[in-house]
Structures are given as C-alpha cells and as structure tokens.
Amino acid sequence: MSEHPSTPRSGTPRVSPPRAGAVGRRGFLAGAAAVAASAAGPAALAQAAPAGPGTAAARPNVLLIVTDDHPKHTEWALPQTIAWLGGQGVTFTHGHSATPLCAPSRSSVFSGKHAHHHGVRNNAASHSLDQSTTVQRHLAQAGYRTGLFGKYLNSWALEDNPPHFEEWALLQPGYNDARWNVDGTVRRIDGYTTNIIRKKTLAFLDKAATDTRPWFAYVTPYASHAPNVPAPKYAETPVPAWNGRPSVPEADRSDKPPYIRDATATLDDARELRTRQLRSLLSVDDTVQAIRDRLAATGQLENTLVIFTGDNGYTWADHGWLKKSVPYSPAHEVPFYLSWPAGGLGSGTTDGRIVANIDIAPTILDAAGIARPAGQDGRSLLGTASRDHLLVQWWKQGAGGTGPHTWASYVAKDKQYTEYYDLHTDATGAVSGTGQVTFREYYDLAADPHQLRNLLHQATPQQEQALGIPALAARLAADRAG
C-alpha cells in the first residue's frame, strides 16, 4: 500500500489534464465498447456493453465512498484519491449536499430524495427513512452483494443491523478503539477506525474471487468529523499554511442574520480545525489508494463505478461560523468525483453541472440497469440532463436554543436566495411553527463569491424587483412544496 511521507506536502497533486463536458450514457457505453473491442476482442466488448436486467454479469460493481463533514479545498490531503478519481474519472466542480447535516444528507444519498420527501430532517430522525426506497435495497433485490463499512446514520442504534446489507462493519462514530456492529455482533475493535474500515473493505472485495455476483460497497470513514483525530503517524504532519479568505472573518456582518452577527470564530480557530481535518483525511487517502490497488490486482478496476463525496461541507470561520448547517457555500459545497472506465468515464474530465447527493442513487441504479423508482428527486449523472439551480435546505431541531432557524435556499452558479422560517422539527422529523419568513439573503455569486454583501439588506421594493426576488421566492416556494 502506498504510504504518505511524514515530510510536508505542498501544492496540488498533478493529474491528467481535464476535458470539459458531460457524456451521455449511450454515448460513453458505445465508446467504451468500441475501445474494448479493438483492444481485447468480443469478451471485452460484452463486458463494456450496457447492462440490463438480463445481463447481470455485465453490471458494474459499485463503490460509494462518503466522508464526514468534508469541505472542499482539501485536495492537499487527497493526492492519491484525486490522481485516481480525478485523473481517471470525472471531477464535478459544482458538487453539493442538499441538506448540510449528516443524517439528512446520508438519507438523500440512499434514497435519491430531498429531506422533505424522505423525512429525515435532522440527526435524530434516522428511523424515519423508508428503507424500502434505498439504493441498497434495490441493488440487493437485483442480485448485488452489499456491504457497509463505517458510519451509517446518526441516532441509529448500534445494536440494530442496517437493512439490505449482506455484510457490514457498522461504526459507532469515533477514531480509536471504537465499538462496532460486525455482521450482528457488537464488540470493541482496537485500532484506528479508518484503517479498520480499509481492512474490512478489502476483505469484501477479495470475496469476488469466489462470489461472482456484482457488489455494492458503501465505505464511510469518520474523517474529517470533529474531533478530527489523525492516525498516529500523521499526528504531527505539517500542512500548508492558510491565510483564510475574504469571508474569514467578515469585517461587517450587519447584513447577516442574528446568529451570524453573534458568531465569534476566528482565523486562528479555522487554521486549527483545518489542520486537524487535513491530517485525518490523510488516512482516508491511504484507504482509497489501497482499495484502488486491490481492485486493479483482482481485475475489478475497469468495471467498478466509484463515487466519492462528502456528506456535507464545513465552514472555516466564514462569517465567524465554524460549523455546518448554514446556507453559505462552504457548508453545502462538497468534493464530488466519479470513475467508471468500462462505462467510458475513466479519462480525466471535468463536469460543471450542478450536482448533489440526491443524484447518487439514480446514477447507481442507471449504471446497474435498474429502473428508476418513483419519487426520486435526483437524476442520473450518466446522462446529459442538467439543472439551473438546486434546492438546499436545513431544519432546526427543537424550539429553543441558539443558532440558525430553519432555512431553504435557491442555489445557482451565479446567485443564491435564502429564506429563514419560523419552523422547527421534533425527533421524528415532524415540522411545527408558523412558517413565517424571518430573514432573507441574496448574493450575486458571480460578483461576490464569498457572500459578503447581502443585497436584500435595506433594499427597497424596487431594488428587490430589479434583482428578480419575487420570481426567486416563488420558485423556492414551489421547490419546497414539490
């Protein structure tokens, strides 16, 4: 297994030059078939052909890697991951979490639905997810071998086995000497949890030598979630210096909601957090490389669809905030990569479409030749469909306390409109409150990418009209109701 050096790293890893543009599923499958035919003859052509219900042997394996509280701009810690999935796959430059909170986001990954449709609106409501709607259920029903290795859903009891997984090592979140549910047995396993996840995943991959079914592996380390504990060998690894960005801290927050005006995180706070996060991600990078090496050694690399993303982003003292759960870009933008060489997605391209965690389940089912179930909000990334904006939302749990109110946001590449509401949720995800709008924000992301100037602060009705706010508010209401 490739190891990280203990000496400082600098710069961004070198990968193959990207080529822009999305490729339709039929187009890239046809291209893959042609390449395979010229290189290896009819057997390879059959392997690269579109999978369907009657061609289970041609269906891809699926590796889904979801990291925890993982913001963008962490490439330094992931050179091997980016060399593989960026250099030999697709880098999505506008990847998002549709709800920047762990359990709602992961439920969207599984179901392809927005949180207001799957019902897991907060971390306490994991059991509100209809397990019959999940991608693992559809894959298991279609004959896939399924495995889960790492974190599952917040508030899920460790003693409860995860539905529709044939094998699992379910982690009670932590970094060292944690408790696990391994195939129904709860026990403590000593060691660094990312390394244990790697070992369990590799064993799952090795079983393909005797079990010819295609497989789905959900691999989900705890990094880079707080307390962001690195493996011992990376505990003192120097990280590149960081001098913040214009939003860290924002000098004048008088145009922001009250909880942001009261936020107190500093650049030094952000630097300390960033250092811990990057060090914890170094072991994730080792794990991804070990998986890649094992797939190559066992002949499974070409026909494995790999998706890598974070469940949500995280702010580094942007606007004084050092958490997630807010509508600002660092909290809902996430790394997002995809590779599938046998499907024609293995050559190092970039894709500028707005994509999100709700698109993961539809993409996997499309690749596996499984009909898209009713009710999914996302769309397959294997086609050419695109969206001009994304609904991003978050719900406050409980009626008291501080922090953000429930909010919903219209997020496009060039603008973002957000409304806060008098709404809160209980432990089941049920919503209460008047629904009254309590605060609004609008940012011109083209001119103000760091969201420093809320153009609705003290705006006149005429200025709001000129910004197109009535139409954005109507679209946001429709998205929330849809």
Image (spheres, rainbow, N blue to C red):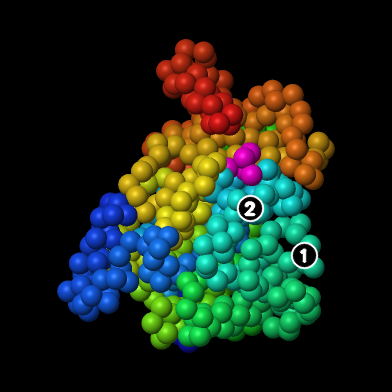
Q: Earlier in the sequence, mark 2 or mark 1?
A: 2
Residue in front for this viewpoint, 276 or 480: 480
- Residue reaching furthest to the right: 400
Q: Is residue 395 left or right of residue 350?
A: right
- Residue reaching furthest to the top: 462
Circle 2 sits in a helix, a strand or a loop, which is it?
helix
> What span is colored magenta in the figure?
114-118
Q: Amino acid at mark 2?
A: Ser
Q: Which residue is mark 1?
A: 160
Q: Amino acid at mark 1?
A: Asp
* Vertical placement of residue 482 versus 7, above or below: above
Circle 1 sits in a helix, a strand or a loop, which is it?
loop
Which residue is at 44% across, 46% downward? 379
Q: Which residue is mark 2?
A: 132
Point out residue 460 in the picture as x, y percentages from the top left corner.
52, 14
- Residue reaching furthest to the front: 54
- The secondary structure that dominates the magenta segment is helix
Which residue is at 61% across, 80% downward? 200
Q: Locate residue 278: give its quadrant.
A: bottom right
* Vertical placement of residue 80 versus 17, above or below: below
